[in-house]
Amino acid sequence: MSINKTAYQQIISELAPHNITLVAVSKIKPVSDILELYQLSQRDFGENYVQELVDKANQLPKDIRWHFIGHLQSNKAKYIAPFVHLIHGIDSLNLLKEVNKQAAKNGRVIDVLLQVHIADEESKFGFDESELNDTIEKVQALALNNIKIVGLMGMASFSDNESKVRSEFKKLKKLFSSNAFQSLPSRPSILSFGMSGDYKIAIEEGSTMVRIGSLLFGARL
Ligand SMILES: *Cc1c(COP(=O)(O)O)cnc(C)c1O
Protein backbone atom coordinates (compact mmCIF):
# COMPACT_ATOMS: atom_id res chain seq x y z
CA MET A 1 0.00 0.00 0.00
CA SER A 2 1.18 3.47 -0.69
CA ILE A 3 0.01 7.02 -0.64
CA ASN A 4 -0.65 9.23 -3.65
CA LYS A 5 2.15 11.82 -3.44
CA THR A 6 1.09 13.60 -6.60
CA ALA A 7 -2.41 14.14 -5.26
CA TYR A 8 -0.94 15.34 -1.96
CA GLN A 9 1.28 17.97 -3.59
CA GLN A 10 -1.58 19.05 -5.81
CA ILE A 11 -3.99 19.49 -2.89
CA ILE A 12 -1.39 21.31 -0.79
CA SER A 13 -0.80 23.76 -3.63
CA GLU A 14 -4.54 24.39 -4.02
CA LEU A 15 -5.00 25.02 -0.29
CA ALA A 16 -1.93 27.15 0.37
CA PRO A 17 -3.11 30.42 -1.24
CA HIS A 18 -6.21 30.29 0.99
CA ASN A 19 -4.41 29.27 4.17
CA ILE A 20 -6.60 26.20 4.49
CA THR A 21 -5.44 23.41 6.80
CA LEU A 22 -5.38 19.89 5.42
CA VAL A 23 -6.43 17.12 7.78
CA ALA A 24 -5.32 13.84 6.22
CA VAL A 25 -8.01 11.29 7.06
CA SER A 26 -6.18 8.04 7.75
CA LYS A 27 -8.97 5.83 9.15
CA ILE A 28 -8.54 2.13 8.36
CA LYS A 29 -5.13 2.88 6.77
CA PRO A 30 -1.90 1.45 8.19
CA VAL A 31 0.63 3.46 10.20
CA SER A 32 3.14 2.97 7.37
CA ASP A 33 0.92 5.11 5.11
CA ILE A 34 0.68 7.79 7.78
CA LEU A 35 4.47 7.81 8.13
CA GLU A 36 4.90 8.27 4.39
CA LEU A 37 2.78 11.38 4.50
CA TYR A 38 4.48 12.51 7.71
CA GLN A 39 7.79 12.37 5.88
CA LEU A 40 6.38 14.83 3.36
CA SER A 41 5.77 17.22 6.32
CA GLN A 42 2.08 16.45 6.90
CA ARG A 43 1.29 16.84 10.62
CA ASP A 44 -2.52 16.95 10.89
CA PHE A 45 -4.21 13.56 10.72
CA GLY A 46 -7.85 12.63 11.27
CA GLU A 47 -9.30 9.42 12.67
CA ASN A 48 -12.88 8.22 13.23
CA TYR A 49 -12.53 5.44 15.78
CA VAL A 50 -11.27 5.91 19.34
CA GLN A 51 -9.40 2.62 19.73
CA GLU A 52 -7.74 2.95 16.34
CA LEU A 53 -6.71 6.52 17.10
CA VAL A 54 -5.18 5.57 20.46
CA ASP A 55 -3.29 2.63 18.93
CA LYS A 56 -1.89 4.74 16.11
CA ALA A 57 -0.96 7.67 18.34
CA ASN A 58 1.06 5.27 20.50
CA GLN A 59 3.05 4.07 17.51
CA LEU A 60 3.65 7.33 15.69
CA PRO A 61 5.70 10.53 16.24
CA LYS A 62 4.53 12.74 19.09
CA ASP A 63 4.35 15.92 17.05
CA ILE A 64 1.41 14.65 15.00
CA ARG A 65 -1.73 16.69 15.61
CA TRP A 66 -4.54 14.17 15.94
CA HIS A 67 -8.04 15.21 14.94
CA PHE A 68 -10.97 13.12 16.07
CA ILE A 69 -13.51 13.42 13.25
CA GLY A 70 -15.88 10.56 14.01
CA HIS A 71 -18.95 10.34 16.19
CA LEU A 72 -17.62 10.41 19.75
CA GLN A 73 -19.46 8.46 22.42
CA SER A 74 -19.30 10.18 25.82
CA ASN A 75 -17.91 7.15 27.59
CA LYS A 76 -14.90 7.08 25.24
CA ALA A 77 -13.85 10.72 25.53
CA LYS A 78 -11.48 9.79 28.34
CA TYR A 79 -9.27 7.74 26.03
CA ILE A 80 -8.43 10.59 23.68
CA ALA A 81 -8.53 13.47 26.18
CA PRO A 82 -4.82 13.21 27.11
CA PHE A 83 -3.55 14.01 23.63
CA VAL A 84 -6.22 14.88 21.03
CA HIS A 85 -5.58 18.15 19.16
CA LEU A 86 -9.11 18.94 17.96
CA ILE A 87 -12.45 17.15 18.25
CA HIS A 88 -14.59 17.92 15.20
CA GLY A 89 -17.89 16.20 15.82
CA ILE A 90 -19.41 17.53 19.04
CA ASP A 91 -23.15 17.15 18.67
CA SER A 92 -24.63 17.39 22.17
CA LEU A 93 -24.30 19.46 25.31
CA ASN A 94 -23.71 16.27 27.31
CA LEU A 95 -20.74 15.37 25.18
CA LEU A 96 -19.37 18.87 25.58
CA LYS A 97 -19.64 18.53 29.36
CA GLU A 98 -17.95 15.14 29.33
CA VAL A 99 -15.05 16.37 27.18
CA ASN A 100 -14.71 19.32 29.55
CA LYS A 101 -14.54 16.96 32.51
CA GLN A 102 -11.95 14.70 30.90
CA ALA A 103 -9.89 17.68 29.75
CA ALA A 104 -9.86 18.99 33.33
CA LYS A 105 -8.66 15.61 34.60
CA ASN A 106 -5.75 15.89 32.20
CA GLY A 107 -5.05 19.51 33.03
CA ARG A 108 -5.83 20.55 29.47
CA VAL A 109 -8.08 22.84 27.49
CA ILE A 110 -9.35 20.88 24.49
CA ASP A 111 -10.35 22.63 21.27
CA VAL A 112 -13.65 21.44 19.81
CA LEU A 113 -15.88 22.09 16.82
CA LEU A 114 -19.65 21.84 16.98
CA GLN A 115 -21.06 19.66 14.23
CA VAL A 116 -23.96 21.05 12.23
CA HIS A 117 -26.32 18.85 10.26
CA ILE A 118 -26.33 20.44 6.80
CA ALA A 119 -27.06 17.43 4.57
CA ASP A 120 -30.56 16.20 3.87
CA GLU A 121 -29.48 12.69 4.81
CA GLU A 122 -30.85 11.35 8.07
CA SER A 123 -27.72 9.37 8.79
CA LYS A 124 -25.46 12.35 9.41
CA PHE A 125 -25.02 13.69 12.91
CA GLY A 126 -25.11 17.25 14.14
CA PHE A 127 -27.14 20.14 15.48
CA ASP A 128 -29.78 21.92 13.45
CA GLU A 129 -29.85 25.70 13.60
CA SER A 130 -32.10 26.07 16.63
CA GLU A 131 -30.27 23.37 18.58
CA LEU A 132 -27.01 25.11 17.78
CA ASN A 133 -28.23 28.45 19.07
CA ASP A 134 -29.70 26.80 22.12
CA THR A 135 -26.38 25.06 22.83
CA ILE A 136 -24.40 28.28 22.42
CA GLU A 137 -26.61 29.95 25.01
CA LYS A 138 -26.35 27.11 27.49
CA VAL A 139 -22.60 26.78 27.09
CA GLN A 140 -22.04 30.41 28.02
CA ALA A 141 -23.97 29.94 31.24
CA LEU A 142 -22.03 26.80 32.20
CA ALA A 143 -18.47 28.15 32.20
CA LEU A 144 -16.87 25.01 30.80
CA ASN A 145 -13.31 26.19 31.30
CA ASN A 146 -11.56 23.14 29.89
CA ILE A 147 -13.02 23.23 26.41
CA LYS A 148 -12.73 25.90 23.78
CA ILE A 149 -15.28 26.07 20.97
CA VAL A 150 -13.09 27.09 18.06
CA GLY A 151 -15.50 26.58 15.16
CA LEU A 152 -18.03 24.49 13.28
CA MET A 153 -17.86 21.29 11.26
CA GLY A 154 -20.24 19.88 8.67
CA MET A 155 -20.65 17.24 5.99
CA ALA A 156 -22.56 17.94 2.80
CA SER A 157 -24.89 15.41 1.20
CA PHE A 158 -23.12 12.68 -0.71
CA SER A 159 -24.19 13.94 -4.11
CA ASP A 160 -22.98 14.84 -7.60
CA ASN A 161 -25.27 17.83 -7.52
CA GLU A 162 -22.76 20.63 -7.13
CA SER A 163 -25.29 23.38 -6.45
CA LYS A 164 -26.84 21.32 -3.68
CA VAL A 165 -23.49 20.71 -2.00
CA ARG A 166 -22.62 24.38 -2.45
CA SER A 167 -25.83 25.57 -0.81
CA GLU A 168 -25.26 23.23 2.15
CA PHE A 169 -21.77 24.69 2.62
CA LYS A 170 -23.23 28.20 2.39
CA LYS A 171 -25.68 27.35 5.15
CA LEU A 172 -22.79 26.29 7.40
CA LYS A 173 -20.78 29.39 6.60
CA LYS A 174 -23.78 31.57 7.42
CA LEU A 175 -24.24 29.97 10.83
CA PHE A 176 -20.53 30.34 11.47
CA SER A 177 -20.66 34.04 10.66
CA SER A 178 -23.82 34.69 12.66
CA ASN A 179 -23.72 37.05 15.62
CA ALA A 180 -24.90 34.28 17.89
CA PHE A 181 -21.91 32.09 17.10
CA GLN A 182 -19.31 34.81 16.76
CA SER A 183 -20.35 36.24 20.13
CA LEU A 184 -18.69 33.30 21.85
CA PRO A 185 -15.75 34.52 23.92
CA SER A 186 -13.55 31.88 22.27
CA ARG A 187 -13.74 33.84 18.98
CA PRO A 188 -14.30 30.84 16.68
CA SER A 189 -12.11 30.81 13.58
CA ILE A 190 -12.24 27.26 12.20
CA LEU A 191 -14.73 26.08 9.62
CA SER A 192 -14.19 22.40 8.88
CA PHE A 193 -15.84 21.24 5.67
CA GLY A 194 -14.78 19.62 2.41
CA MET A 195 -13.76 16.00 1.71
CA SER A 196 -12.24 14.18 -1.29
CA GLY A 197 -15.33 14.59 -3.43
CA ASP A 198 -16.20 18.19 -2.65
CA TYR A 199 -13.12 19.98 -1.35
CA LYS A 200 -12.81 22.22 -4.43
CA ILE A 201 -16.30 23.56 -3.77
CA ALA A 202 -15.35 23.87 -0.09
CA ILE A 203 -12.37 26.07 -0.97
CA GLU A 204 -14.67 28.38 -2.94
CA GLU A 205 -17.22 28.49 -0.12
CA GLY A 206 -14.82 29.57 2.61
CA SER A 207 -13.64 26.41 4.33
CA THR A 208 -10.61 26.88 6.58
CA MET A 209 -9.99 23.17 7.16
CA VAL A 210 -10.62 20.27 4.78
CA ARG A 211 -10.68 16.60 5.75
CA ILE A 212 -9.37 14.44 2.91
CA GLY A 213 -8.89 10.69 2.96
CA SER A 214 -9.36 8.65 -0.18
CA LEU A 215 -7.58 11.05 -2.57
CA LEU A 216 -4.43 10.68 -0.45
CA PHE A 217 -4.61 7.11 0.78
CA GLY A 218 -6.75 5.44 -1.87
CA ALA A 219 -10.27 4.10 -1.54
CA ARG A 220 -11.25 2.37 1.72
CA LEU A 221 -12.38 -1.09 0.73
C1 LIG B 1 -13.99 9.52 6.20
C2 LIG B 1 -14.25 10.96 6.48
C3 LIG B 1 -13.66 11.98 5.70
C4 LIG B 1 -12.78 11.72 4.51
O1 LIG B 1 -13.53 11.22 3.44
P1 LIG B 1 -12.90 11.03 1.98
O2 LIG B 1 -14.09 11.04 1.10
O3 LIG B 1 -12.17 9.74 1.98
O4 LIG B 1 -12.01 12.19 1.72
C5 LIG B 1 -13.90 13.30 6.07
N1 LIG B 1 -14.68 13.61 7.12
C6 LIG B 1 -15.27 12.67 7.88
C7 LIG B 1 -16.12 13.08 9.02
C8 LIG B 1 -15.09 11.32 7.57
O5 LIG B 1 -15.70 10.39 8.31
Image (cartoon, helix red, strand yellow):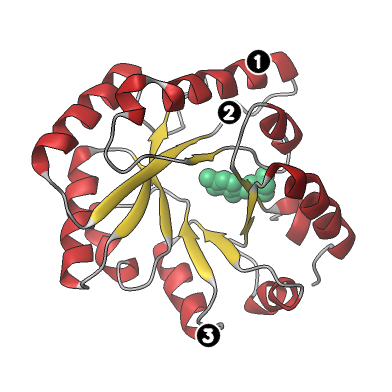
- How many residues crowd around disc 1 within 10 Å: few (fewer than 14), some, or many (20 or more)? some
Q: Are marks 1 and 2 in contact (CB under 8 Å)?
A: yes
| Residue 49 image point, x, y percent | 45, 60
Q: Amino acid at mark 2?
A: Ala
Q: Quadrant of the C terminus?
A: bottom right
Q: Amino acid at mark 3?
A: Gln
Q: Along the line of sight, which residue is nearer the eye, 101 or 126?
A: 101
| In the depicted structure, whether residue 158 falls above or below residue 168 | below
Q: Is residue 28 left or right of residue 78?
A: right
Identify the secondary structure beneath mark 3.
helix
User: Which residue is disc 2 drawn over?
Assistant: 156
Q: Is residue 63 left or right of residue 203?
A: left
Identify the secondary structure beneath mark 2.
loop
Q: Amino acid at mark 1?
A: Lys
The answer to which of marks 3 and 1 sits earlier in the sequence is 3
> Residue sitting at 52 percent across and 60 percent down?
47
Identify the secondary structure beneath mark 1.
helix
* Mark 3 C-beta to ligand 1 under 8 Å: no
Q: Which mark is residue 59?
A: 3
- How many residues crowd around disc 3 within 10 Å: few (fewer than 14), some, or many (20 or more)? few
Does the rendering let one see residue 33? yes
The answer to which of marks 1 and 2 sits earlier in the sequence is 2
> Residue sitting at 30 percent across and 67 percent down?
81
